[in-house]
Image (spheres, grey):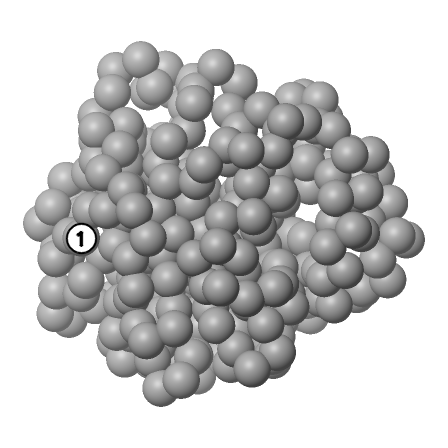
Amino acid sequence: MKIRLLNENLVSDLCWLAEYGFSAWIEYEGSKIVFDTGWSDVWCRNAETAHIDLNAADVIALSHFHSDHSRGLLFHPFTEKKTLVLHPRVMTALLDPFIEPPDRHLPHRYSDIERKIRADFEIVETAGPYEIAPGAFFLGQIPRVVPFERGYYYEDTMEDDTALAFRTDKGAVVLTGCSHSGICNICTYAKSVTGQDLYAVIGGFHLVHPEKPAVDETIAWLRAEGIPRLLPVHCVSFDIQARLQSEFGYDRPGAGSLIEI
């Protein structure tokens, strides 16, 4: 299994581009999957640098509706309709007038993304786990079971926030977008869906200061799970990222990084 980070907040080397957001290209047991698309065309440009043919993708999946994960769809290079898997709430949230105002300072509207999705993709909406390829799961709606995680984004309950999980011979590999639903909630559900213990958790952990995350409790939970590979990126405040690196001893990946399982 290989994961190439097509977009992330920081670059891994000089030849890559970065922006606030997330996108990954996954090669798993013969299947090719795009997970999130960042905010602009950076994911496409980094794919070109990595010599990845995005038209070879078998399926695209969205972790949630936020524009730093979904707006890149406006720039997709696909020459035919691809299957796009998402939670049903994504399409309604993109048209919700009460969600639009916080991003009015940005040069886009969420409704543009909704129109693009309807015009250019074969949409699969699912609130439950969905096997996008044998052994590869779109988790759907994440149960909130860990008491110290809010599972909200400010006052938005974020029912659409989800992740991908893969069965491997080493254990479950979890790929997250932003983890608004709670990184520990996601990991708990991924274990249930895959039937495996966790081997790797990669992606946004959403441990950011404005939302007062339960950092001590999260670290204790992750340590108790004994996960061999933890690679938090994207939405983690710098000091929390430093603490996680100190606790778990990893090199932080960035845009362009190739992660091999």
Q: Answer with left or right where residue 156 lies relative to residue 115.
A: right
* Residue 8: x %, y % from top left: 57, 55
Look at the picture and state if 12 lies above or below 211. Answer: below
* Residue 221: x %, y % from top left: 75, 44
Asked which secondary structure carries label 1, the reply is: strand
* Residue 79: x %, y % from top left: 15, 71
Residue at 18% in and 53% down: 124
Residue at 69% in and 70% down: 13
* Residue 158: x %, y % from top left: 41, 29
Q: Which residue is mark 1?
A: 124
Look at the picture and state if 158 lies above or below 6. Answer: above
Q: Answer with left or right where residue 96 lies relative to residue 31.
A: left
Look at the picture and state if 100 lies above or below 194. Answer: above
What is the three-letter code of the residue carrying label 1?
A: Val
State the residue in front, 64 or 38: 64
Q: Answer with left or right where residue 159 lies relative to residue 149.
A: left
Q: Residue furthest right?
A: 246
